[in-house]
């Protein structure tokens, strides 16, 4: 990690962090609030990862920001965890195994983002102290333009493979929520993607029943079948996902005639 020594007391501060330096100012030197708000909003809203190079801000957004001398804060470098599972789907794992330098899925994803010289800061969701240590170690080792052409090609290949096997391009950002009918949209997509990434339909149907029924949380169901196709969520989704259409597919696949049996079994297991 890089440190900066403070001139007054000699304290060493890490230069990692979230800051709002160099916000645009008016001619009088005050912060130009409308432009500053747009700048920060732009940075926060636009995730960048190796799967989403052509949607959201993507690599085009990186170039746009750089041309305007904006710092770039990258959200969603691990795509809501989709591309950082310790054991990736086997077709992707086969691709990573061909690399000359072995890396974990998290390392591939973060090294790829840091490889872009335009990137100022990465905001990566972390739930455990180990994640913090892992992310800091990668940030410490990664350098702009340090991945070889062969490594960049490998990442492109992994991205194409994920796009082939992932059903819905949902990042789990939650901007589409709340749904007036209570559909747990991102949870439904997360379970559906997991089922197809790992080809585990039966386990997935139990997971769907558990998480969408609300048994574990607020006791309110949010099944895909509750969608009435009002379209309210469509314009809120930065990924432009055809949400009601996918929800109809999910309802058909995950809510079959065995759904109530699954719920009974789950309730027994949870002593409910
Ligand atoms: S289209 Fe369906 S999921 Fe979207 S807001 Fe309407 S009811 Fe909810
Ligand atoms: S459906 Fe769209 S808005 Fe909703 S969580 Fe997924 S990516 Fe975000």
Image (cartoon, rainbow, N blue to C red):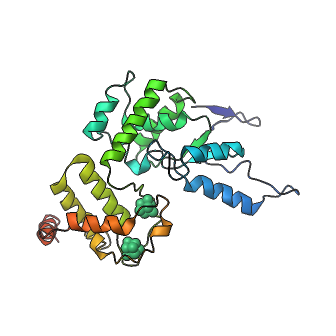
Which residue is at the front of the view, 14 or 142? 142
Left or right placement of residue 159 versus residue 191 in this view: right
Left or right placement of residue 244 versus residue 209 in this view: right
Quarter of the view holding residue 247: bottom left
Which residue is at the front of the view, 42 or 58? 58
Number of numbered discs = 0
Left or right placement of residue 100 versus residue 20 in this view: left
At x 50%, y 60%, the residue is 238
Quarter of the view holding residue 36: bottom right
Q: Where residue 182 appears, x then y in whole percent? A: 36, 75
Q: Is residue 1 above or below residue 35?
A: above
Which residue reaches farthest right? Answer: 28
At x 47%, y 38%, the residue is 110
Which residue is at the front of the view, 88 or 225? 225
Q: Where residue 136 appears, x then y in whole percent? A: 50, 36
Q: Name the quarter showing ligand 2.
A: bottom left
Q: Where residue 150 appears, x then y in whole percent? A: 44, 25
Q: Is residue 148 above or below residue 156?
A: above
- Residue 241 appears in the picture as rendered: yes
Q: Where residue 267 appears, x then y in whole percent? A: 16, 69
At x 50%, y 27%, the residue is 147
Q: Is residue 225 above or below residue 16?
A: below
Which residue reaches farthest top? Answer: 100
What quarter of the picture does the N terminus occupy? top right
What quarter of the picture does the C terminus occupy? bottom left
- Residue 223 appears in the picture as rendered: no
């Amino acid at each position: 990690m890089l440190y900066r020594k403070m001139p007054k007391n000699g304290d060493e501060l890490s230069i990692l962090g979230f800051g709002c330096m160099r916000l645009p100012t008016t001619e009088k030197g005050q912060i130009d609030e409308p432009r500053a708000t747009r700048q920060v909003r732009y940075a926060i809203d636009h995730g960048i990862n190796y799967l989403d190079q052509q949607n959201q801000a993507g690599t085009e957004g990186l170039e746009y920001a750089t041309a305007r001398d904006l710092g770039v804060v990258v959200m969603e470098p691990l795509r809501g965890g989709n591309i950082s599972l310790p054991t990736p789907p086997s077709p992707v794992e086969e691709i990573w195994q061909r690399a000359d330098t072995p890396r974990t899925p998290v390392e591939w994803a973060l090294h790829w983002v840091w490889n872009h010289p335009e990137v100022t800061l990465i905001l990566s969701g972390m739930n455990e102290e180990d994640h913090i240590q892992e992310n800091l170690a990668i940030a410490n080792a990664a350098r702009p333009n340090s991945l070889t052409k062969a490594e960049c090609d490998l990442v492109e290949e992994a991205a194409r493979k994920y796009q082939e096997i992932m059903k819905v391009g949902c990042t789990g950002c939650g901007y589409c929520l709340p749904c007036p009918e209570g559909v747990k949209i991102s949870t439904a997509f997360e379970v559906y993607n997991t089922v197809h990434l790992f080809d585990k339909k039966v386990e997935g149907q139990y997971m769907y029943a558990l998480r969408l029924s609300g048994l574990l949380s607020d006791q309110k169901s949010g099944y895909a079948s509750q969608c009435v196709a009002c379209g309210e969520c469509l314009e809120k989704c930065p990924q432009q996902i055809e949400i009601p259409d996918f929800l109809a597919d999910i309802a058909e696949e995950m809510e079959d005639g065995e759904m109530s049996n699954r719920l009974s079994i789950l309730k027994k297991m949870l002593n409910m």
